[in-house]
Image: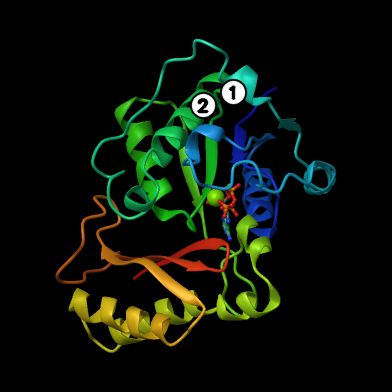
Amino acid sequence: MEGPFGLVPTMGALHAGHASLVSRARSECRSVGVSIFVNPSQFGPGEDYKSYPRPVERDLALLESLGADVVWMPRPESIYPPGYRTWVEVAEITEPLEGQSRPGHFRGVATIVARLLNSFTPDRAYFGQKDAQQVAVLRRMVRDLDFPVEVVVCPTVREPDGLAMSSRNAYLNPEERKAAAVLYRALTAAKEKYDQGERNAESLRSTMRAVLRSEPLASEQYISAADPESLQELETIGRGALLSMAVRIGKARLIDNIVL
Ligand SMILES: Nc1ncnc2c1ncn2[C@@H]1O[C@H](COP(=O)(O)OP(=O)(O)OP(=O)(O)O)[C@@H](O)[C@H]1O
Ligand SMILES: [Mg+2]
Protein backbone atom coordinates (compact mmCIF):
# COMPACT_ATOMS: atom_id res chain seq x y z
CA MET A 1 0.00 0.00 0.00
CA GLU A 2 1.10 3.55 -0.69
CA GLY A 3 1.58 6.38 1.78
CA PRO A 4 2.58 6.28 5.43
CA PHE A 5 1.81 3.10 7.31
CA GLY A 6 1.00 3.57 11.00
CA LEU A 7 1.35 0.78 13.56
CA VAL A 8 -0.37 0.69 16.95
CA PRO A 9 1.01 -2.06 19.21
CA THR A 10 -1.41 -3.20 21.95
CA MET A 11 -2.13 -6.07 24.31
CA GLY A 12 -5.85 -5.93 23.49
CA ALA A 13 -8.71 -5.47 25.97
CA LEU A 14 -9.07 -2.21 24.13
CA HIS A 15 -10.44 0.99 25.65
CA ALA A 16 -10.71 4.65 24.71
CA GLY A 17 -6.95 5.11 25.26
CA HIS A 18 -6.16 2.58 22.55
CA ALA A 19 -8.92 4.05 20.38
CA SER A 20 -7.28 7.46 20.57
CA LEU A 21 -4.02 5.97 19.24
CA VAL A 22 -5.81 4.22 16.37
CA SER A 23 -7.79 7.38 15.52
CA ARG A 24 -4.64 9.46 15.53
CA ALA A 25 -2.94 6.95 13.25
CA ARG A 26 -6.04 6.88 11.04
CA SER A 27 -5.90 10.67 10.69
CA GLU A 28 -2.19 10.72 9.79
CA CYS A 29 -1.61 7.55 7.80
CA ARG A 30 -2.76 6.00 4.59
CA SER A 31 -3.03 2.62 6.25
CA VAL A 32 -3.22 1.57 9.88
CA GLY A 33 -2.16 -1.71 11.46
CA VAL A 34 -2.89 -2.78 15.02
CA SER A 35 -1.20 -5.64 16.80
CA ILE A 36 -2.92 -7.43 19.66
CA PHE A 37 -0.46 -9.57 21.54
CA VAL A 38 -0.34 -10.29 25.25
CA ASN A 39 3.41 -10.59 25.25
CA PRO A 40 4.45 -13.24 27.78
CA SER A 41 8.04 -12.02 28.01
CA GLN A 42 7.05 -8.67 29.50
CA PHE A 43 5.18 -10.28 32.42
CA GLY A 44 7.04 -11.27 35.58
CA PRO A 45 6.61 -14.69 37.30
CA GLY A 46 3.84 -13.67 39.75
CA GLU A 47 2.07 -11.35 37.30
CA ASP A 48 -1.26 -11.60 35.48
CA TYR A 49 -0.21 -13.08 32.10
CA LYS A 50 -2.69 -15.99 32.33
CA SER A 51 -5.61 -13.96 33.66
CA TYR A 52 -5.05 -10.89 31.44
CA PRO A 53 -8.40 -10.10 29.72
CA ARG A 54 -8.67 -11.23 26.07
CA PRO A 55 -12.05 -10.04 24.69
CA VAL A 56 -11.10 -10.75 21.07
CA GLU A 57 -14.50 -10.30 19.38
CA ARG A 58 -15.13 -6.97 21.10
CA ASP A 59 -11.62 -5.74 20.22
CA LEU A 60 -12.04 -6.65 16.55
CA ALA A 61 -15.43 -4.93 16.36
CA LEU A 62 -13.96 -1.76 17.88
CA LEU A 63 -10.98 -1.78 15.51
CA GLU A 64 -13.29 -2.28 12.55
CA SER A 65 -15.39 0.71 13.64
CA LEU A 66 -12.22 2.81 13.99
CA GLY A 67 -11.14 1.95 10.46
CA ALA A 68 -8.05 -0.15 11.15
CA ASP A 69 -6.88 -1.84 7.94
CA VAL A 70 -4.96 -4.76 9.42
CA VAL A 71 -5.09 -6.50 12.78
CA TRP A 72 -2.32 -8.89 13.70
CA MET A 73 -2.90 -11.38 16.54
CA PRO A 74 -0.03 -13.84 16.63
CA ARG A 75 0.15 -16.91 18.85
CA PRO A 76 2.88 -16.81 21.51
CA GLU A 77 4.42 -20.02 20.05
CA SER A 78 4.95 -18.31 16.72
CA ILE A 79 6.68 -15.33 18.33
CA TYR A 80 8.77 -17.38 20.77
CA PRO A 81 9.27 -20.80 19.15
CA PRO A 82 11.50 -23.36 20.86
CA GLY A 83 15.09 -22.17 20.42
CA TYR A 84 14.23 -18.47 20.52
CA ARG A 85 17.26 -16.72 22.08
CA THR A 86 17.40 -13.05 21.07
CA TRP A 87 16.54 -10.14 23.36
CA VAL A 88 16.78 -6.37 23.17
CA GLU A 89 18.07 -4.76 26.35
CA VAL A 90 18.00 -1.01 26.82
CA ALA A 91 20.43 -0.21 29.63
CA GLU A 92 20.06 2.05 32.68
CA ILE A 93 16.81 3.86 31.88
CA THR A 94 15.01 0.52 32.31
CA GLU A 95 16.27 0.16 35.88
CA PRO A 96 14.36 2.71 38.03
CA LEU A 97 10.58 3.08 38.47
CA GLU A 98 8.77 0.29 36.59
CA GLY A 99 12.06 -1.54 36.24
CA GLN A 100 12.39 -1.80 40.04
CA SER A 101 8.95 -3.36 40.46
CA ARG A 102 8.99 -5.34 37.22
CA PRO A 103 12.47 -6.71 36.48
CA GLY A 104 12.70 -7.90 32.88
CA HIS A 105 9.54 -6.06 31.85
CA PHE A 106 11.25 -3.64 29.47
CA ARG A 107 13.40 -6.37 27.97
CA GLY A 108 10.15 -8.01 26.90
CA VAL A 109 8.67 -4.73 25.69
CA ALA A 110 11.77 -3.65 23.73
CA THR A 111 12.09 -7.09 22.15
CA ILE A 112 8.49 -7.33 20.98
CA VAL A 113 8.41 -3.75 19.69
CA ALA A 114 11.71 -4.25 17.83
CA ARG A 115 10.21 -7.37 16.32
CA LEU A 116 7.04 -5.53 15.26
CA LEU A 117 9.06 -2.69 13.74
CA ASN A 118 11.18 -5.16 11.78
CA SER A 119 8.23 -7.24 10.60
CA PHE A 120 5.91 -4.41 9.60
CA THR A 121 8.37 -1.58 8.83
CA PRO A 122 5.80 1.10 9.75
CA ASP A 123 6.58 4.74 8.99
CA ARG A 124 5.04 5.74 12.32
CA ALA A 125 4.45 3.83 15.54
CA TYR A 126 1.95 5.10 18.10
CA PHE A 127 2.29 4.86 21.87
CA GLY A 128 0.51 6.36 24.89
CA GLN A 129 1.96 8.86 27.33
CA LYS A 130 0.33 6.84 30.14
CA ASP A 131 3.36 4.55 29.90
CA ALA A 132 5.96 7.31 30.15
CA GLN A 133 8.96 5.11 30.88
CA GLN A 134 8.00 2.80 28.02
CA VAL A 135 8.04 5.87 25.76
CA ALA A 136 11.52 6.84 27.01
CA VAL A 137 12.81 3.28 26.54
CA LEU A 138 11.36 2.88 23.04
CA ARG A 139 12.56 6.30 21.87
CA ARG A 140 16.04 5.35 23.08
CA MET A 141 15.88 1.97 21.33
CA VAL A 142 14.69 3.52 18.06
CA ARG A 143 17.52 6.05 18.17
CA ASP A 144 20.20 3.58 19.27
CA LEU A 145 19.28 0.87 16.74
CA ASP A 146 18.40 3.28 13.90
CA PHE A 147 14.89 2.03 13.31
CA PRO A 148 13.54 4.13 10.41
CA VAL A 149 10.31 4.95 12.21
CA GLU A 150 8.78 8.03 13.78
CA VAL A 151 7.62 7.45 17.34
CA VAL A 152 4.33 9.29 17.96
CA VAL A 153 3.25 9.75 21.57
CA CYS A 154 -0.44 10.42 22.30
CA PRO A 155 -1.86 12.06 25.43
CA THR A 156 -3.25 9.97 28.27
CA VAL A 157 -7.01 9.43 27.96
CA ARG A 158 -8.77 9.63 31.32
CA GLU A 159 -12.12 8.75 32.88
CA PRO A 160 -14.21 11.75 34.03
CA ASP A 161 -12.71 11.50 37.57
CA GLY A 162 -9.18 11.59 36.16
CA LEU A 163 -8.33 7.88 36.32
CA ALA A 164 -6.10 7.00 33.38
CA MET A 165 -7.78 4.40 31.21
CA SER A 166 -6.10 1.02 31.45
CA SER A 167 -7.12 -2.52 30.64
CA ARG A 168 -6.21 -3.41 34.21
CA ASN A 169 -8.85 -1.03 35.60
CA ALA A 170 -11.20 -3.97 34.97
CA TYR A 171 -9.64 -5.65 38.04
CA LEU A 172 -11.10 -2.97 40.35
CA ASN A 173 -14.33 -3.52 42.28
CA PRO A 174 -16.63 -0.48 42.58
CA GLU A 175 -15.08 0.69 45.86
CA GLU A 176 -11.54 0.30 44.52
CA ARG A 177 -12.53 2.00 41.28
CA LYS A 178 -13.57 5.08 43.29
CA ALA A 179 -10.33 4.97 45.27
CA ALA A 180 -8.30 4.79 42.05
CA ALA A 181 -8.98 8.45 41.30
CA VAL A 182 -6.37 9.17 43.99
CA LEU A 183 -3.49 8.78 41.52
CA TYR A 184 -4.59 11.70 39.38
CA ARG A 185 -5.52 13.73 42.47
CA ALA A 186 -1.98 13.25 43.77
CA LEU A 187 -0.45 14.26 40.43
CA THR A 188 -2.62 17.36 40.09
CA ALA A 189 -1.93 18.39 43.70
CA ALA A 190 1.79 18.34 42.90
CA LYS A 191 1.23 20.22 39.66
CA GLU A 192 -0.65 22.92 41.56
CA LYS A 193 2.33 23.33 43.86
CA TYR A 194 4.59 23.56 40.82
CA ASP A 195 2.31 26.14 39.21
CA GLN A 196 2.50 28.15 42.43
CA GLY A 197 6.28 28.22 42.12
CA GLU A 198 7.51 25.16 44.05
CA ARG A 199 10.70 23.82 42.43
CA ASN A 200 11.90 21.46 45.14
CA ALA A 201 11.41 17.94 43.81
CA GLU A 202 11.27 16.32 47.24
CA SER A 203 8.48 18.66 48.22
CA LEU A 204 6.45 17.59 45.16
CA ARG A 205 7.10 13.93 45.98
CA SER A 206 5.89 14.59 49.55
CA THR A 207 2.74 16.25 48.26
CA MET A 208 1.95 13.23 46.07
CA ARG A 209 2.73 10.83 48.93
CA ALA A 210 0.44 12.69 51.34
CA VAL A 211 -2.49 12.56 48.91
CA LEU A 212 -1.93 8.84 48.27
CA ARG A 213 -1.80 8.11 51.99
CA SER A 214 -5.20 9.75 52.43
CA GLU A 215 -6.69 6.84 50.48
CA PRO A 216 -6.68 3.69 52.64
CA LEU A 217 -7.18 1.29 49.70
CA ALA A 218 -4.11 2.61 47.87
CA SER A 219 -0.60 1.37 48.56
CA GLU A 220 2.34 3.14 47.02
CA GLN A 221 4.94 1.27 44.94
CA TYR A 222 6.87 4.35 43.92
CA ILE A 223 6.46 8.08 43.62
CA SER A 224 8.83 9.97 41.38
CA ALA A 225 9.78 13.39 40.10
CA ALA A 226 12.33 12.60 37.43
CA ASP A 227 13.98 13.71 34.24
CA PRO A 228 11.74 12.42 31.42
CA GLU A 229 14.64 10.98 29.39
CA SER A 230 17.16 9.71 31.93
CA LEU A 231 14.45 8.91 34.50
CA GLN A 232 16.85 9.95 37.24
CA GLU A 233 15.21 11.51 40.30
CA LEU A 234 15.51 15.29 40.33
CA GLU A 235 16.42 17.59 43.19
CA THR A 236 15.18 20.69 41.40
CA ILE A 237 12.23 20.64 39.05
CA GLY A 238 12.53 22.17 35.60
CA ARG A 239 10.16 22.32 32.66
CA GLY A 240 9.35 18.90 31.27
CA ALA A 241 9.91 17.09 34.55
CA LEU A 242 8.01 13.81 34.79
CA LEU A 243 5.86 13.19 37.86
CA SER A 244 4.92 9.53 38.02
CA MET A 245 3.73 6.81 40.34
CA ALA A 246 2.72 3.18 40.65
CA VAL A 247 0.07 2.23 43.15
CA ARG A 248 -1.53 -1.04 44.15
CA ILE A 249 -5.28 -1.01 44.70
CA GLY A 250 -6.82 -4.42 45.31
CA LYS A 251 -5.60 -6.79 42.58
CA ALA A 252 -4.66 -3.95 40.24
CA ARG A 253 -1.30 -2.30 39.86
CA LEU A 254 -1.93 1.15 38.40
CA ILE A 255 0.48 3.69 36.95
CA ASP A 256 0.02 7.31 35.98
CA ASN A 257 2.09 10.41 35.27
CA ILE A 258 2.03 14.01 34.16
CA VAL A 259 4.69 16.13 32.52
CA LEU A 260 5.20 19.61 34.01
N1 LIG B 1 -5.26 5.83 28.93
C1 LIG B 1 -4.46 5.78 27.87
N2 LIG B 1 -4.29 6.86 27.09
C2 LIG B 1 -3.46 6.82 26.02
N3 LIG B 1 -2.76 5.72 25.64
C3 LIG B 1 -2.90 4.61 26.38
C4 LIG B 1 -3.75 4.58 27.53
N4 LIG B 1 -3.68 3.33 28.06
C5 LIG B 1 -2.83 2.64 27.30
N5 LIG B 1 -2.36 3.39 26.29
C6 LIG B 1 -1.37 3.00 25.29
O1 LIG B 1 -1.85 1.93 24.51
C7 LIG B 1 -0.75 1.13 24.09
C8 LIG B 1 -1.04 -0.31 24.41
O2 LIG B 1 -1.09 -0.45 25.82
P1 LIG B 1 -1.68 -1.71 26.55
O3 LIG B 1 -2.33 -2.60 25.56
O4 LIG B 1 -0.68 -2.23 27.49
O5 LIG B 1 -2.91 -1.07 27.36
P2 LIG B 1 -3.01 -0.70 28.88
O6 LIG B 1 -4.32 -0.08 29.13
O7 LIG B 1 -1.75 0.00 29.25
O8 LIG B 1 -3.05 -2.09 29.58
P3 LIG B 1 -2.37 -2.43 30.95
O9 LIG B 1 -2.74 -1.38 31.93
O10 LIG B 1 -2.90 -3.75 31.27
O11 LIG B 1 -0.90 -2.45 30.64
C9 LIG B 1 0.48 1.67 24.82
O12 LIG B 1 1.21 2.50 23.95
C10 LIG B 1 -0.14 2.45 25.95
O13 LIG B 1 0.70 3.50 26.41
MG1 LIG C 1 -0.05 -1.37 29.29
Q: In the image, what residue occupies the spot 56% across and 67% down?
A: 164
Disc ID at residue 250: none
Label 2 secondary element: helix
Q: Which residue is mark 2?
A: 117
Image coordinates of residue 240 in percent, x first then y, are: 30, 64
Label 1 secondary element: helix
Image coordinates of residue 63 in percent, x first then y, are: 77, 44
Disc ID at residue 120: 1
Nearer the observer, 163 or 239: 163
Q: Is mark 1 within 8 Å of ligand 1?
A: no
Q: In the image, what residue occupies the spot 38% across and 32% down?
A: 142
Q: Residue furthest top?
A: 83
Crowd class of label 2 (few under 14; some 14 to 19; many from 20; radius 10 Å): many
Crowd class of label 1 (few under 14; some 14 to 19; many from 20; radius 10 Å): few
Quarter of the image that includes the C terminus? bottom left
Q: How many labels sit on residues?
A: 2
Position above or below: 144 against 215: above
Cβ–Cβ below 8 Å for labels 2 and 1? yes
Identify residue type, mark 1.
Phe
Colouring rule applied to residues: rainbow
Q: Residue furthest front?
A: 46
Side (left or right) of 92 relative to 170: left
Side (left or right) of 39 relative to 241: right
Side (left or right) of 207 relative to 250: left
